[in-house]
Image (cartoon, rainbow, N blue to C red):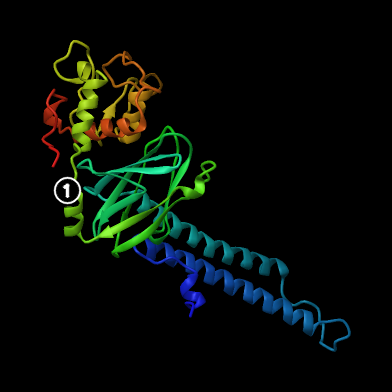
């Protein structure tokens, strides 16, 4: 006997993250208010169509209400209601765009037509994302070719990944299990095949999975090797012959720029300085002598370089030694 239709074709994905109930509350409240509004307007229209139809004996005295007052009240009421939804949605958006501090970071590189995923200790997987239950997870994502979109319906998570940018998103899984991962943006002929799974595991099981069978270097250690391979160390390690800014403690700090003002050194700022140093504000006290690495460094290497720079504490000041992170 086949399964009931409701079980075979669920109308709504499961709720498996801390964000999902918040999104559902906004969605269902908006749907409920819309249904009530449409039902009320439909009832009023039907009443007037039937009660005041041609030939009916219903009284038709002169209108006793100022129509301008009715119109003003209607506009004011609907404006207040839907502005309330706007601010509710904006508050949710801000919550979604601000990952908690010290979240577990995982790199995601999107390319036609697969997800290339790497964990902090170097463990690599394709079209699968293993994460621990009950922990904040921040995804640092970039695309190697076209626009992709990281979409996990059970988490109510959808983040567009635009070429030339580093973007991030985060979630907090609340249920163990396997959940569908899709590309939510048409990205070419095999777009429909760009699917995968997010596998939520108990923390102890995830820690075991993370280390068993992994022979890769951590992303920060690999980033240090790339830092030397691309000759970044020749200028940014201190002391150096070239007068270049030290990178220790750079990530997350406010950087003074030429001409006055400050910019926040996030992933996008670091990426732009690597690929397009002449098109971004120059650090105060330094000259624009850095060469461009546009079309030289692939996306996966770029994420590793950024991870290495992020790992540098202020006291290292970009010294030649890599951070105290060793592969398992």
Q: Position of residue 152 (x, y in %)?
A: 40, 55
| Residue corresponding to mark 1 | 211
Residue drawn at x 46%, y 74% is: 7
Classify 166 as above or below 71.
Answer: above
Callout 1: helix, strand or loop? helix
Classify 19 as above or below 108.
Answer: below
Q: Position of residue 74 (x, y in %)?
A: 63, 67
Instruction: Tell whether 224 sits left or right of 46.
Output: left
Which residue in the rendered view is the most extreme toward the top? 241
- How many marks the image carries: the answer is 1
Asked whether residue 97 is in view, the answer is yes
Q: Position of residue 212 (x, y in %)?
A: 17, 49
Classify 172 as above or below 125.
Answer: below
> Quadrant of the rendered structure where residue 256 is?
top left
The 10 Å Cα crowd at callout 1, few under 14, some 14 to 19, many 20 or more, is: some
Classify 21 as above or below 268.
Answer: below
Q: Nearer the viewer, residue 57 or 125?
A: 125
Q: Quadrant of the C terminus?
A: top left
Instruction: Tell whether 33 sits left or right of 130.
Output: right
> Quadrant of the rendered structure where residue 60 is?
bottom right
Asked whether residue 17 is in view, the answer is no
Residue drawn at x 12%, y 26% is: 321
Residue drawn at x 81%, y 82% is: 52
Q: Position of residue 121 (x, y in %)?
A: 19, 42
Residue drawn at x 44%, y 34% is: 163
Which residue in the rendered view is the most extreme toward the right? 55
Which residue in the rendered view is the most extreme toward the bottom? 57
Q: Nearer the viewer, residue 328 or 259?
A: 328
């Amino acid at each position: 006997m086949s399964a009931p239709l409701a079980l075979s074709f669920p109308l709504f994905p499961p709720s498996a993250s801390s964000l999902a109930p918040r999104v559902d509350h906004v969605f269902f409240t908006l749907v409920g208010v819309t249904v009530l509004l449409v039902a009320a307007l439909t009832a009023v229209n039907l009443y007037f169509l039937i009660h005041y139809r041609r030939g009916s004996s219903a009284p038709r005295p002169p209108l006793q209400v100022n129509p301008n007052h009715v119109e003003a009240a209607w506009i004011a009421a609907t404006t207040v209601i839907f502005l309330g939804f706007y601010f509710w949605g904006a508050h949710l958006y801000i919550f979604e765009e601000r990952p908690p501090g010290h979240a577990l970071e995982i790199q995601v590189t999107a390319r036609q037509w697969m997800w290339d995923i790497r964990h902090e200790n170097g463990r690599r997987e394709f079209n699968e994302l293993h994460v621990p239950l009950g922990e904040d997870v921040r995804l640092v994502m970039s695309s190697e070719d076209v626009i992709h979109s990281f979409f996990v319906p059970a988490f109510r998570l959808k983040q567009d990944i635009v070429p030339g940018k580093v973007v991030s998103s985060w979630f907090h899984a609340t249920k163990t299990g396997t959940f569908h991962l899709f590309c939510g943006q048409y990205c070419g002929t095999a777009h429909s095949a760009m699917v995968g799974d997010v596998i939520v595991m108990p923390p102890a099981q995830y820690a075991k999975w993370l280390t068993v069978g992994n022979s890769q270097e951590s992303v920060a250690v690999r980033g240090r090797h790339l830092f030397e391979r691309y000759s970044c160390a020749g200028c940014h390690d201190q002391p150096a012959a070239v007068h270049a800014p030290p990178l220790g403690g750079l990530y997350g700090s406010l950087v003074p720029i030429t001409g006055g003002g400050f910019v926040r050194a996030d992933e996008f700022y670091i990426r732009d300085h690597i690929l397009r140093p002449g098109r971004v504000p120059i650090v105060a006290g330094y000259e624009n002598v850095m060469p461009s690495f546009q079309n030289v460094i692939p996306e996966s290497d770029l994420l590793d370089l950024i991870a290495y720079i992020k790992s540098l504490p202020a006291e290292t000041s970009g010294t030649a030694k890599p951070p105290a992170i060793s592969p398992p």
